[in-house]
Amino acid sequence: MVTTNVRWPSSLWAAVTPPGPDLPELIGTERADVIVIGAGFTGLSTALHLREAGVDVAVVEAAEPGWGASGRNNGQVIPTLSRPDPEDIIAKHGAAGERFVAMLRDSASALFDVVQKYKIEAEQEQAGWVQPVHSPGRIKIAERRVKQWSKFGAPVELLSRDQVSDMTGSNAWYGGFWNKTGGHVNPLALARGLAHAALGLGARIYARSPAISFERRNDKWIVKTEKGEISGRALVMATNAYSGEFSKSLVPEIATEVMPVLSWQMSTQPLSDNVRKTIIPGRQAMSDTHGELYFARYDARNRLITGGAVLGPGNKVERMKARVTERLQRLWPQIGDVSFDYVWNGYVGMTADFLPRIHRLGPNAYGWTGCNGRAVALTIPLGRELSRAVQGVPESELALPFTEPVTYMAHGLLRKIAPWMLLLYRRRDAQELLKGDNFELLKWAEHFLASRR
């Protein structure tokens, strides 16, 4: 039996965001021109762009809009991928990769444009996104990314160590780069705002209706739920890291080609004005080059929203609080005592090469997965492109680098093992620091490794 009860995570976003629209379940038999499965950023953006073109569309959602990764993430709007750079993307996908790079370059602006167009109140701040580098050796990453993204017209800028110190309020980093179009949002407010906008244009959204299966029958796509079914000419699968969470048989070829890894988010209590002005004073979104990522941004109430990862048994929430408190006090000693009022988690869909996977599922049917921690900006224009695909726009004009699904062998076992890659990331991060000539950093790295044996 598939449950239709919706329990929201104990997140800051769930606590401060106005309720979403009151939506019906899918009961009985319905029809639409296009069926979208999943009411996260991708599905809602797809529906919104279809309605802008006058196409009849219905969204089938297992829980409520924004319940999954779209409403649980940090809300950083980052117009890049996490690892691959433009040349990597183009080398793999050719001309389609070039179009994808152009879409990615403009992805943050595309999001903020939609927010402005539909007057969505998402606590949006287009203050930029900065990526500091955590060791002298990794400044080459910043140099490479600035060079490559500049070639494609992105507003990126290489930053010296002093510039990063001024921008972040910390001397912990060695330089970096930033993109002025990035920023941050309340992601749940964005999801609910997109839902309201799509409904306002005439889309239908069915909530608390997990899709159990879909099939092609008589030139139509049929999507079945526990209480009903809906048929349509075209289909978009927009379930990403949650593709196998409600029905293992829904789309196994997508669910088993991505590793859903838990990412923990947490928010401090509001910082005082005096302290806030010394920590990321320009309010940029920030995520650095650690394998075990250091990231932070402010919300509209001056809470610092950050997070991390934790392994093993025990009280994970309290361990996360202790670990991240130590990190924040090391990065920003001026922060003083740290108190967290919300700690929550959600899945990030990871792929082996950190590239998203975009697929043709059949005639007029498409799906994707593999956000790799970059879904907020990416999914808004991706939804636009998927809407164009189901309207018959030629593949040569789409920013969609299609591939065939390649599943992980022994996916269930690997899913249990994947979080332990964190140990490897921690060791690599420490080894990078050991290459430097700073005695304090050497001592800290030695302590870091010893404390985790």
Image (tube, rainbow, N blue to C red):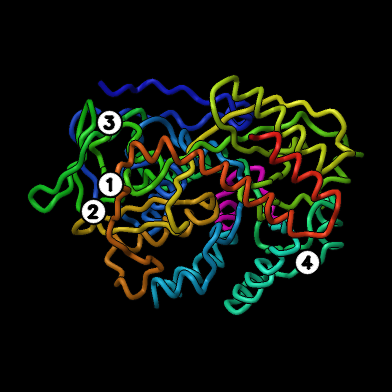
Residue at horizontal 84%, vertical 42%? 332
Q: Amino acid at mark 2?
A: Ala
Q: Amino acid at mark 1?
A: Ile
* Percent of width and height locating residue 304: 74, 38
Residue at horizontal 43%, vertical 75%? 91
Whether the magenta-drawn stretch holds residue 320 is answered as no
Q: Quadrant of residue 342?
A: top right
Earlier residue among tags 1 and 3? 3
Residue for badge 1: 35
Closer-to-camera residue (319/217): 319
Going by the image, does 420 lie left or right of 112? left
Residue for badge 2: 234
Give, as a single range, the part of the protein colored magenta: 110-128
Helix, strand or loop under label 3: loop
Which quadrant: the N terminus? top left
Task: State how far apart marks 4 and 2 are (Cα).
Answer: 46 Å
Helix, strand or loop under label 2: strand
How many residues crowd around disc 2 within 10 Å: few (fewer than 14), some, or many (20 or more)? Answer: many
Residue for badge 3: 26
Q: Amino acid at mark 3?
A: Leu
Which quadrant: the C terminus? top right
How many residues crowd around disc 3 within 10 Å: few (fewer than 14), some, or many (20 or more)? Answer: many
Task: State how far apart marks 3 and 4 are (Cα).
Answer: 52 Å
Residue for badge 4: 159
**Are the residues tagged 1 and 2 within 8 Å (C-beta)?**
yes
